[in-house]
Image (tube, rainbow, N blue to C red):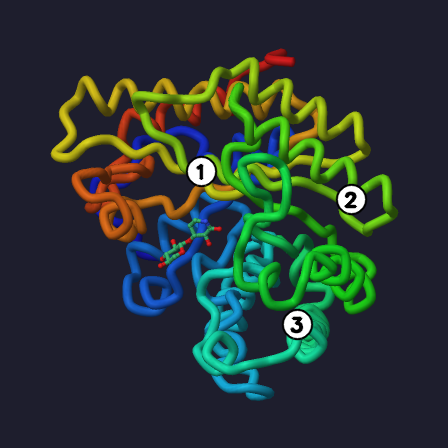
Amino acid sequence: MHVPEGFRDAGPTLRALAAARGLRIGAAVNVQALRDDADYRAVLAAEFNAVTAENAMKFAPFQPERGIFRFDDADELVSFAEAHGMTVRGHTLAWHETLPSWLTEADHTPGELLDILHTHIQTVVDHFRGRVFAWDVVNEAVAEDGSYRDTFWHRHAGPRFVDLAFQWAREADPDARLFYNDFQGEGSGHRAKTIYRFVKRLRARGVPIDGVGLQMHLRADRPPNRRHIVRAVKRFASLGLETHITELDVRVPVPADWLVLDRQASVYGDVFSAATASPGCTNVVLWGFTDRYSWIPHRFEDWGAALPFDDSYRPKPAYAAIATELGKRNSQ
Ligand code: XIL
């Protein structure tokens, strides 16, 4: 396979370092880039042993019209992953964003909406049965105060959608690991507590959940404390839940200078140090891997450069920091 010029020095790849300690290191994949950009494919396959679809497995791309399912993009990604020995996380079944207008603009009753969600989950999870090892079943459903967040599914279908989504996913693929995924589940703030309580209640009422996803879209100037990440994983483990870090990126103000990129590297290092010290955390997925394709500049004005490869696929200080942590022995 062609490898882009200047792409990394000699030494083990991130995926080799991760595999040596039984970890998966993944990246969210932009399917258009996977198709069009040979350098993107080469670096992805060389450095990572897990993938998530950045958008291709969301509701609207899967079901652009009611009852019409399109799997081409996601199938392409799953085939790529299988050809390169990578696992696939499915993202995401019940979320309030990336919904098609046929769904959001019509006047469905709660019963109809639950039927639609049921059919969606059944069809999608069944299609990828045995090929997607973990699903983010419900994404971002908790409000600041620990109650249900006021979003499309909650408002129009009612709170039952959460428990039902997990049950339907379990029925469609009993072997897939089922995750609740959210942001700020790891810090010292309020959301870490409320997310913990939310999944604890799910467990208490017998909802089939196996794990919690910590998104971790971080800012280099306000990182979570390493100890808090370790503590969050421990708490989830005490409920019998595993933890995946699912969407890690560390944004910086742009244009970024070396000082800022070093600061970013130490944040990446801390997160990987926490993950490698936590037996409950076996997967760390970055939300992309190259600054060439990242959602950050589109979402946060004046921020960017959030990933460990720059937009020419040159490894940044963050890359070295991740490799160092993954290569350390006895960090437990
Ligand atoms: C983002 C994608 O990166 C963007 O390309 C898209 O326009 C919007 O969604 N939390 C999530 C992800 O769970 O699905 C989001 O991904 C980022 C925030």
Closer to us: 84 or 332? 332
Is 287 positioned to the left or the right of 182 in the image?
left
Q: Which circle marks residue 177 in the picture?
A: none
Indicate the amino acid at tag 1.
Answer: Leu
Indicate the amino acid at tag 3.
Answer: Leu
For the question of whether residue 55 can be seen, the reply is yes
Whether tag 3 and tag 2 are in contact, CB under 8 A, the answer is no
Identify which residue is drawn at 53% across, 42% down.
Answer: 246
Closer to us: 165 or 269? 165
Q: Which circle marks residue 202 in the picture?
A: 2
Give the mark, 1 or 2, whose residue is nearer the N terminus: 2
Q: Tell us which disc is closer to us: 1 or 2.
A: 2
Image quarter for ligand 1 equals bottom left
Dot 1, how many residues are within 10 Å of its Cα: few (below 14), some (14-19), or many (20+)?
Answer: many
Q: Considering only vertical position in the picture, is 76 above or below 45? A: below
Q: CA distance from mark 1 to mark 3?
A: 28 Å
* Residue identifier under label 3: 117
Give the mark, 1 or 3, whose residue is nearer the N terminus: 3
Give the mark, 3 or 2, whose residue is nearer the N terminus: 3
Q: Quadrant of the C terminus?
A: top right
Identify which residue is drawn at 66% across, 35% down.
Answer: 243
Q: Position of residue 257 (x, y in %)?
A: 14, 25
- Mark 1 CB near ligand 1 (8 Å cut): no
For the question of whether residue 282 can be seen, the reply is no
Q: Element type at marker 3? A: helix
Q: Quadrant of the N terminus?
A: bottom left
* Residue identifier under label 1: 248
Q: CA distance from mark 3 to mark 2?
A: 19 Å
Is 127 positioned to the left or the right of 269 in the image?
right
Q: Position of residue 110 (x, y in %)?
A: 67, 73
Q: Element type at marker 1? A: strand
Q: Position of residue 321 (x, y in %)?
A: 38, 22
